[in-house]
Amino acid sequence: MSRDDYPTDQPAVVTCGLPYANGDLHIGHLRTYVSGDALARSLRRLGQRTAFVSGSDMHGTPVAVNAEKAGVTPEEFALEWHEKYEATFPEFGVEFDNYGHTHDETNAELTREFVREWIDGDHVYEKEIQVAWDPEVDQPLPDRYVEGTCPYCGERARGDECDEGCQRHLEPGEIENPTSTITGNPAEYRSRDHEFLRLADFQEYLKGFLGRLEGTDNARNQPREWIEGELQDLCITRDMDWGIEYPGEGKEDLVLYVWVDAPIEYVASTKQYSDRVGSDEFDWEAAWKEGAPGPGEPMDDPSAEGGEILHVIGRDIIQHHTVFWPAMLRGAGYNEPRAVMASGFVNLDGKAFSTSRNRAIWADDYLDEGFESDLLRYYLVTTGGFQQDIDFSWERFQERVNGELVGNVGNFVYRSLLFASRNFEGTPEADPSEEVLSEINDAMEAFRADLNEYSIREASQAGVRLSRFGNEYIQRHEPWKLVDEEPEEAAQVIRDCVQLAKAAAVLLEPVLPDTTERLWAQLGEEGSVHDVDLTACLEDPPAEFGEPEALFEKIEDERVERLNERLEERVAAASADSDSGDETADAEDEGGDASEDEGTETEGLEPVTDERIDFEEFQSLDVRVGEVLAAEGIEGADDLARLEVDIGVETRQIVAGIKRLHDLDALPGTRVVILANLEPAELFGVESNGMLLAAGEDADLLTTLGDSEPGTKVR
């Protein structure tokens, strides 16, 4: 890999965590896949040669268990879900260059090659371990057949992972008080010989790797505690008959652990893409192997020649991608990842998703409702920082769509192209102004810089800011007043607006691919917006085009009410089934991106998150006392109000959802607490520059006990 800014001369591979072929996708799962797709599109926009690959994780215990329940083979069961995912992803604009699965021969053969390299490099050893056993049915219990207590934090855990507590990977035999999920009886431990990858061989390398790793802070920092102390070796075999057979002699009764063959699918999927399009188009070995130290060669220096490998995953599988996977790659003579981006979870209206209680927005639900996929893409990419948990509700979805897409982007594009078409039959004969060219160049540079910081959210805002500037620009110059008396000046203004609309299309394509393709056609452009690079922002738009159509439709309150009613009815029905003893266990996402299930509630309160921040991160929050100077409702918005707040050093405009919860006329003079260093956002066409802090559903405004002056920092 290089350490240069993107685009580089090396091929890039963007991957997403493999979805586990065991259940339906919901919008929590889609966050990483949409973000991975937007990242791949953004890199191509810069001119980076990029392959976007993933696949379905077919192996593991849950597939075998559920296949048995369904009366089919594990392969039949998993392939059905694989084909469902393969059809669903494009419905959300997620266009993989190759989408394979772990049970195909390409992955099986590559996995065996990896393991043979580890064996030849003396990184694999055999050890007798204690394996959970169900004495009633006289069979070993693979990971997901065992539940018990985590030896590290004391929380409930499953056989290979403390998924409800510290999220540590657990080796066979570590879990305490094991219980068989088959019979519900206490399990016992028996001795069995298994194979281990000696991670201690890679401990010093991994310390250096984490120092070089790019991506999100959580992916770089969380693994340090695992590798600074005694690094636990990885058991790479399991007592099952569904999976890839261990390639060593005399071990025909063992298969490889699912977390061995699952990440190797990244390589296999890239190879399949390369085989299909030809190595001249994309060379998988140049990306994964070129320049990498061979097995046995020094492993403490990063390659300067191989590809740029970028993984987009959920935060629950950070350890697998920053400890196990780089060690696996190094032991087989492959290049290390350049970046790992680990996302937070998606909650539903303030609470975690619960698949068992049907408390989720399923991918099929969203599509059946008739919403365009770009609306959800925009929400998932732009709501909150990538590594933070975000919240989805139909009301918040409505606000983002109506405010930022309809009220800003759609409004600017439609009014500009309509005026241009009716008055000039297309792009006016004028050169773009220096002011507008400067604005576009700044947006292009911001897009490059944000992408090189791995902030897909911020990169996507470059086009949104251009639209916001365009709305202000057209309002400031009022071309409808100039067209008769100052036609040349009117032509100049509209020429600028058409250029801004084209640049916005180029910059927004990664997050709004379908919408920008329609906009591209409305501009009369030839070809596809997907095929142009960033320089197209400054190229002249076509001289002629017809009248445009609106890019987005407003979401009405009645529709949101209907959606909420359907969700409540579904949750109530599922809860009734659960209470009557007909609850089905939640689908597990072993090997892919998992979404948290609901936590324990106490008298209606949300559980305290286990995710901690350090003091340095807390200090980065600029929380201040402010005084409300003015407050008024935003026309057309049911809940939103615009506030002017004095924070001592300046007056801020803040939008808050308190219109129906507070007497706005009584708010001036009230001391409040705000988060001052939150990124600006546009809500219902009004820019909000800060966040008003309030407690609970009634928006109980936070204030101070004494008379702290506006601008006083809250510590």
Image (spheres, helix red, strand yellow):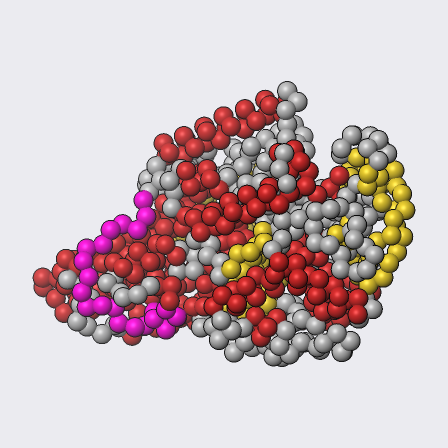
Which residue appears at 63% of the width and 67% of the height?
A: 337
Which residue appears at 25% of the width and 68% of the height?
A: 541
Residue 535 shown in magenta: yes
Which residue appears at 70% of the width and 65% of the height?
A: 113
Q: Nearer the viewer, residue 392 or 365?
A: 365
Q: Is residue 400 above or below residue 72?
A: below
Figure label count: 0
Can you give x and y, in whole percent of width and height, for residue 297 in the image?
A: 76, 78
Principal SS element in the magenta part? Answer: loop
Which span of residues is magenta-colored?
A: 532-553
Quarter of the image containing the N terminus?
Answer: bottom right
Can you give x and y, in whole percent of width and height, for residue 583 in the image?
A: 64, 27
- The answer to whether residue 613 of the structure is visible from this angle is no
Query: Along the horizontal axis of the image, is 358 left or right of 476?
Result: right
Residue 337 shown in magenta: no
Q: Nearer the viewer, residue 422 or 646?
A: 422
Query: Along the horizontal axis of the image, is 365 left or right of 604?
Result: left
Can you give x and y, in whole percent of width and height, for residue 415 in the image?
A: 23, 54
Which residue appears at 67% of the width and 76% of the height?
A: 292
Can you give x and y, in whole percent of width and height, for residue 23 in the image?
A: 58, 40
Query: Along the horizontal axis of the image, is 34 left or right of 417?
Result: right
Q: Nearer the viewer, residue 25 or 69?
A: 69
- The answer to whether residue 109 of the structure is visible from this angle is yes
Q: Is residue 103 above or below residue 698?
A: below
Q: Residue furthest left?
A: 484
